[in-house]
Image: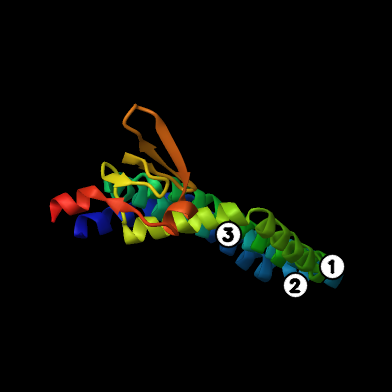
Amino acid sequence: MKNNSTKLSWEMAKKSLLPLFTLLLFFASYVFYKIKISPVISSSLRQDLKKYIGTIFILCVIFVIQRIVGAVACWYEKNIAAKTPTPLDDDIVPLVRRSLKIIFWVMGLLVILPFYGVNISALITALGVGSLAIALAAQDTIANIIAGFLIMIDRPFRIGDKIKLPSGEIVNVLDIGIRRSKFLFEDKAIIIVPNLDLSKSKIVNYTYGEQR
């Protein structure tokens, strides 16, 4: 456990070194600006520089947070996900990392835009309506992803188990995917079933019975 914690700390240090150095350089430049430049420039120019300095600061902070999250995700992939029997987390971790990256930059953009006189209220409303439309259009996909998580947590079957599907086929579990799971039928055919259908139906697990 201590070794894993050391690896995580080292990964975070490596990923965060460049953005942290950039942030420290920014602070040093800001201190120099406040002491040497700000007192001798006009108020209008000072207001313009304030916007640009705020923009650079927010970008640096997002860059640091993004690199730290990337380091944690990379450590999890190498030390946790690679050792689990199911590939579900191998697919989920990169998806979560990319989603968080997009969320961080969108939030940063929403904070930066008011510096330049942009009213973000209408933009937030449009994003909310767009997100609702996307959620309604992809509700089956979202339901299957949630069902995949529930299957991974409840473990009604595992990779390699012999089970009976709701449709009656007796199969071996090949893969538990994000949206669909794959099963090997007796005639070497692959049966692909949406996770939502599996989560709300009765599954007969012969392997569990043999182990008991």
Q: Residues within 10 Å of mark 1 (few under 14, many from 20)?
A: few
Separation of marks 3 and 2 at Cα, in angstroms: 30 Å
Q: Residue at x 42, y 57 (%)?
A: 201
- Using the image as rendered, state which of residue 134 and residue 127 is in the foreground: 134
Residue 86 appears at what percent x and percent y? Answer: 33, 46
Label located before the other in sequence (1 or 2) = 2
Q: Quadrant of residue 61?
A: bottom right
Secondary-structure class at tag 1 = loop
- Using the image as rendered, state which of residue 16 and residue 155 is in the foreground: 155
Q: Quadrant of residue 184?
A: top left
| Amino acid of disc 1 | Gly
Which residue was labeled with disc 2? 39
- Residue 62's label in the rendered image is 3
Q: Residues within 10 Å of mark 2 (few under 14, many from 20)?
A: few
Label located before the other in sequence (3 or 2) = 2
Q: Residue at x 33, y 49 (%)?
A: 81
Label located before the other in sequence (1 or 3) = 3
Separation of marks 1 and 2 at Cα, in angstroms: 25 Å
Secondary-structure class at tag 3 = helix
Closer mark to the observer between disc 1 and disc 2? 1
Separation of marks 1 and 3 at Cα, in angstroms: 21 Å
Q: Are marks 1 and 2 in contact (CB under 8 Å)?
A: no
| Amino acid of disc 3 | Ile
Secondary-structure class at tag 2 = helix
The colour style of the image is rainbow
Which residue was labeled with disc 1? 117
Left or right, residue 209 beside residue 140: left
Residue 130 appears at what percent x and percent y? Answer: 74, 59
Residue 179 appears at what percent x and percent y? Answer: 49, 48
Relative height, residue 38 to residue 94 (above, below): below
